[in-house]
């Protein structure tokens, strides 16, 4: 299969940027609409950050502490004080382990008893909440979504208000104002909220230009021209550049604010049992979307830089054009001369 002929890209070669543009468009749309619509559960893993609340309130449950002095041996006259002390240590350890197991079981149920979800996630266009399945401590636990907010550009998620409302309405009827929720945690979330509208706009632009690049490739294939002219190549370079640039800036902002937000939430919420998880899958599809559009840009850029041979072919054609004869014996004048 010849992709280049006479220094020009053949239309069949456009299949390469067509596939890449389609991939960029699909990935950008997945990142944009993750957590919304009918794919809330399936695409929940593709969040910017997830806030883990499964340990929230553990400090409300008293933990067992050892107290009291142990008997010390005053002599070794056959009374076996060492054996007695070892036996008491074993009994104390067993009781402590049992109390710890009970405490952990109670703590694992705190989120349910308080009426709050075990996790809250932040997407580009909405926020979701739910519980870990089968439970928070199981290896490979997954996000079981129970509720999501409506789609909204530049969504503003307020964790403090959500927790206070859910705790007030919970089965324990606890006054939420008496439960310590660090204000710095909400400040970190507000930092993320402030960038969501910009990220939304950039992903909209990235999706739009990727889609236009895909449509442009279809048009080139449909026209069935023997070669692709330079004007068409320049148009596709512009579309690929705008798509790659939008996705690059959007991915960079999303990655930076997510990393900073997660770090600050983990630092501020450690004592309260609040932690955050970075949306790794979201970052992967975002940067892959940029990568495929960047490769598309390279394809069209190389196509534009290929040497064209039209001028050379025209020169060769002119060189082969029959020249006027200078022989005086040819033509009408030659015939006249030969008769005489």
Image: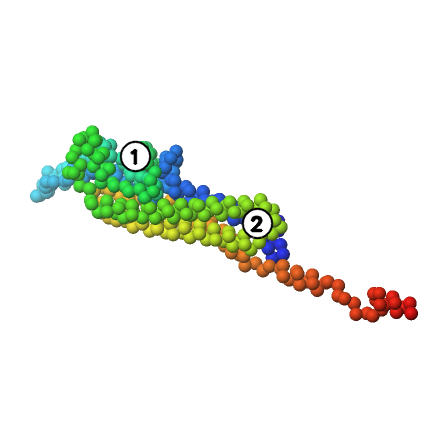
Which quarter of the picture shows residue 37?
top left
Visible residue check, residue 66: yes
Q: Is residue 337 above or below residue 308?
A: below
Identify the residue at horizontal 38%, vertical 40% (top origin).
33
Mark 2 to mark 1 CA distance (whole Å): 49 Å
The percent position of residue 84, horizontal first and vertical second, equals 14, 37
Q: Nearer the viewer, residue 188 or 99?
A: 188
The percent position of residue 178, horizontal first and vertical second, equals 15, 38
* Mark 2 element type: helix
Q: Which of marks 2 and 1 is nearer the N terminus?
A: 2
Q: Using residue 188 as the reference point, say whether residue 304 is left or right of it.
A: right
The percent position of residue 70, horizontal first and vertical second, equals 11, 41
The percent position of residue 20, horizontal first and vertical second, equals 49, 47
Q: Nearer the viewer, residue 44 or 239?
A: 239
Which class describes the residues within 10 Å of circle 1: few (<14), some (14-19), or many (20+)?
many
Identify the residue at horizontal 33%, vertical 51% (top origin).
256
Q: Using residue 276 as the reference point, say whether residue 36 is left or right of it.
A: right
Nearer mark to the viewer, of 2 and 1: 2
Please identify the quadrant where the C terminus is shown.
Answer: bottom right
Q: Name the residue under label 1.
A: 131
Q: Is residue 188 above or below residue 328?
A: above
Q: Mark 2 points at which residue?
A: 13
Q: Are the residues flagged by discs 2 and 1 in contact, CB closer than 8 Å?
A: no
Q: Nearer the viewer, residue 154 or 113?
A: 154
């Amino acid at each position: 299969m010849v992709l280049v002929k006479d220094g020009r890209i053949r239309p069949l070669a456009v299949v390469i940027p067509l596939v890449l543009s389609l991939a960029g468009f699909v990935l950008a749309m997945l990142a944009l609409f993750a957590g919304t619509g009918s794919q809330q559960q399936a695409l929940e893993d593709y969040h910017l950050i997830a806030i883990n609340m499964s340990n929230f309130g553990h400090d409300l449950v008293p933990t067992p502490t050892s107290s009291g002095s142990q008997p010390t041996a005053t002599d070794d006259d056959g009374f076996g004080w060492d054996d007695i002390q070892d036996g008491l240590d074993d009994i104390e350890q067993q009781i402590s382990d049992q109390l710890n197991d009970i405490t952990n079981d109670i703590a694992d149920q705190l989120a349910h008893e308080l009426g709050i979800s075990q996790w809250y996630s932040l997407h580009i266009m909405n926020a979701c909440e739910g519980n870990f399945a089968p439970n928070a401590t199981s290896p490979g636990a997954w996000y079981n979504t129970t509720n999501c907010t409506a789609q909204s550009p530049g969504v503003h998620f307020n964790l403090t208000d959500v927790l206070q409302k859910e705790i007030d309405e919970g089965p324990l009827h606890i006054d939420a104002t008496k439960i310590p929720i660090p204000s710095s945690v909400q400040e970190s979330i507000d930092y993320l909220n402030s960038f969501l509208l910009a990220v939304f706009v950039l992903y909209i632009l990235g999706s739009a230009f990727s889609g236009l690049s895909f449509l442009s490739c279809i048009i080139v294939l449909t026209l069935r021209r023997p070669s692709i002219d330079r004007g068409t190549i320049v148009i596709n370079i512009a579309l690929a550049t705008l798509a790659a640039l939008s996705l690059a800036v959007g991915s960079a902002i999303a990655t930076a604010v997510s990393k900073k937000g997660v770090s600050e939430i983990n630092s501020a919420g450690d004592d309260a049992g609040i932690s955050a998880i970075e949306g790794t899958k979201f970052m992967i599809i975002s940067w892959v979307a940029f990568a495929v559009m960047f490769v598309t840009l390279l394809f069209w850029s190389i196509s534009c830089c290929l040497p064209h041979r039209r001028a050379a072919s025209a020169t060769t054609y002119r060189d082969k054009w029959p020249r006027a004869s200078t022989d005086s014996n040819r033509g009408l004048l030659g015939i006249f001369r030969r008769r005489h």
